[in-house]
Image: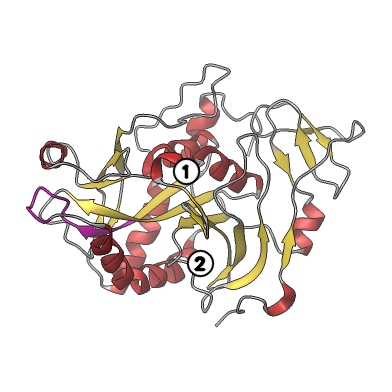
Amino acid sequence: MGLQRGEGQAAKIELSLYVESRGTRMECPICGNELINATDDGGSVCLKCGYRRPAASRMTREGCRPRIAIIGGTGIYNPDAFELIAEVRPDTPYGKPSSAITIGRIAGVEVAFLYRHGTGDERYPPSSVPYRANIWALKQLGCEFVISACAVGSLQEDFAPGDLVIADQFIDFTKKRDYTYFDDRIVHISIPDPFCRYLNGVFAGAAEEMGIRYHLGGRYMCIEGPRFSTRAESSMFRSFADIIGMTAVPECQLARELGMCYCSLATVTDYDVWKDEPVDIEMVSRTMSECLDKVLRLLEIGLPRIEPGGCRECIEAVKGAGALRRQY
């Protein structure tokens, strides 16, 4: 369907920008400070918080203006359905993202794809994923919507292996991650509904059209990992949540801090250990592999339905807290 790797001589764009004192005043969308022009390609950088904006002309020329980001694993990236445009790996104030960001089109829609756990020899377990760099880099590229494709365990009988869960709440049971961009000032963001209700509705409609088993709404228990739960833990978690995973936090709340909409498309791979069915990585990988075609089809149907400005709720909560200065 799309271009194979190597076809079209897709450009690898280097977005590291160098500061020059001259420049037209532009406002940083994160802190409101002045953006200064960069010397290499006309992009700009904020000297206060490190936000970097690539030059609009260059991004447009290379087709790199995706509004939608997909964060997932290697199986979600399907070269047969992905029209490759470019790859970027921008610098951020929090280091490099976990992988190069592949920009292209799925079903005619421009997207930016990021491997959450890295690729090749550069791999990150859940506790070490550079979540802040990942979300910041996607924001730099202009992404407004973030879709997470992930595997989860089930804590309830009716959330069966193979089911799709479109989560609407999380419970944070992690212990040692970088949870916020606001370490240097006090910002209290309201997050009663952490997952975007607009995106959830879009993909629930797509799932309904496909006729697959899905759950619109589910409480996601996020644990530190990388180990799976003990039987005692799994039994306790059942009292509070429906599914269990290791990556929604802080990914979800970091996206909200930057005014981005976030949706989790979670595939149930097992019943955790509360059901006397020991969990191992082979079981998780096998079930996820069996469900990949379903997730890819869900994206092909759902992505074209995401409209610019389709959600105002997520960004308004952030603007109300004073986290974003620029008016959208």
Q: Give percent across and percent down for residue 272.
A: 17, 51
Asked if the residue at tag 1 contacts the one at tag 2, i.e. Cβ–Cβ closer than 8 Å, the answer is no
The amino acid type found where label 1 is placed reads: Val
> For residue 129, which numbered disc appears in the image?
1
Q: Secondary structure at mark 1?
A: loop
Q: Give percent across and percent down for residue 323.
A: 56, 27
Q: Over which residues does the magenta segment extend?
A: 266-277
Rendered image coloring scheme: secondary structure
Q: Say if residue 195 shows up in the picture.
A: no
In magenta segment, residue 201 = no
**Residue wearing tag 2:** 304
> For residue 288, which numbered disc appears in the image?
none
| Foreground residue among 44 and 93 | 93
Q: Give percent across and percent down for residue 192.
A: 34, 32
The amino acid type found where label 2 is placed reads: Pro
Q: Residue at x 44, y 36 (%)?
A: 253
